[in-house]
Image (tube, rainbow, N blue to C red):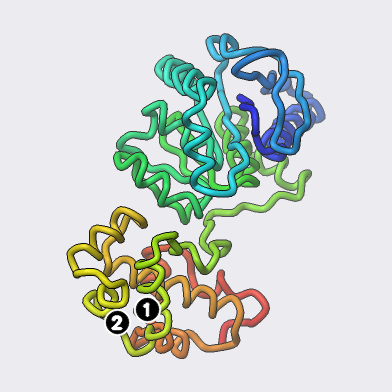
Amino acid sequence: MALDGVTDSGVSVALDVLRAANALSARFGLPAPFSVRVVGARGPTVTTAAGIVLRVGGTLRQLQTSDVVLVPGCWTEAPEDVDRLLARDDVARVATALRRAHDRGVIVGASCTGSFVLAAAGLLDGRKATTTWWLADVLRARYPCVDVTEHQTLIVDGTLLCAGTVFAMADLALAVVARVAGPILAHQCMKVLLLDEHPSQAPYMALRQTTTDEPGLREAEAYARRHLARGVSVSQLARAAGMSTRTFARRVEAALGTTPLGFIQRLRLETATHLLETSPLSLSEIAARVGYRDAGTLRRLLRDKLDVAPRQLRRTHPAA
């Protein structure tokens, strides 16, 4: 299901994975498991984010006879782009069609901002879901009934699948191959296309995912970053923001979807992640720099909050 503004790789990666599955099946003397068609919401063509015009093979009616529908995300550079996407008439029509298709038992999957379309259809209410990590708070704030788990690259919940950022469409397509044609064929596709599994988005999360445009919260964030090692309190952050503690708590909840304590913890984890990626410091040294007494506390929080071990975050510097 390609919307105008769709990421080019979101479409092409899915097509390549499914094409590889068909080709490998033929090599093994088996029938092709997939008949694939790119469909659009309006007209005979779709214009991708890069301006490439794709001739599509059907419209929303095609969903009435499909077994699987995949929705790649549209190119997005700021949260406001999501608002514009969801305000479009064609996106509303697609959301309605996806809800009807899923009610008939169709497998529905989406990646990146495609998860917002599934949420707009009401398909993710009360379920776990993921999206590109830097839009997770936007998804959480807009659809509070969705259990957003941004550190995971892929979440499978029955006949609903959600993947993270743009290239996680490969993970989503491979999951569909495994579901429809079996895990052996999915593994063969991975080998042929030189694809790796990406169970977590955590190693790729940028340091400043807590940043907000609100001046008071930016001041609080700057203060917290300067004093992480010695520890900061909610009242100190509220004073740095020029707010009462109660007002500060409301602003943090509205802007970031968390509590002030959660805000502090997130800053600590982000700083620790950055240091693990870029410095040779030991885990104990990093824990001290972000205000934790011992490495065990930091290790547990990385596992519980980001589902990642310190060694997974080490890049140029081996674990000390």
User: Residue 286: x percent and y percent?
Assistant: 47, 85
Q: Please state which amino acid type lies under the numbered disc 2.
A: Val
| Quarter of the figure with the N terminus | top right
Tell me if residue 222 comes above or below residue 82 in the rendering.
below
Q: Nearer the viewer, residue 290 or 212?
A: 212
Q: Which mark is residue 232?
A: 2
Q: Foreground residue, 240 or 145?
A: 240
User: What's the residue at 30%, 37% (across, down)?
Assistant: 126
Q: Quadrant of residue 265?
A: bottom left
Q: Amino acid at mark 1?
A: Ala
Image quarter hosting the C terminus: bottom right
Q: Secondary structure at mark 2?
A: loop
Where residue 45 sits in the image (x, y, percent)? 72, 19
Task: Please tell me which residue is depicted at 55% across the width and 18% down the height of the picture.
Answer: 67
The residue under label 1 is: 224
Q: Are marks 1 and 2 in contact (CB under 8 Å)?
A: yes
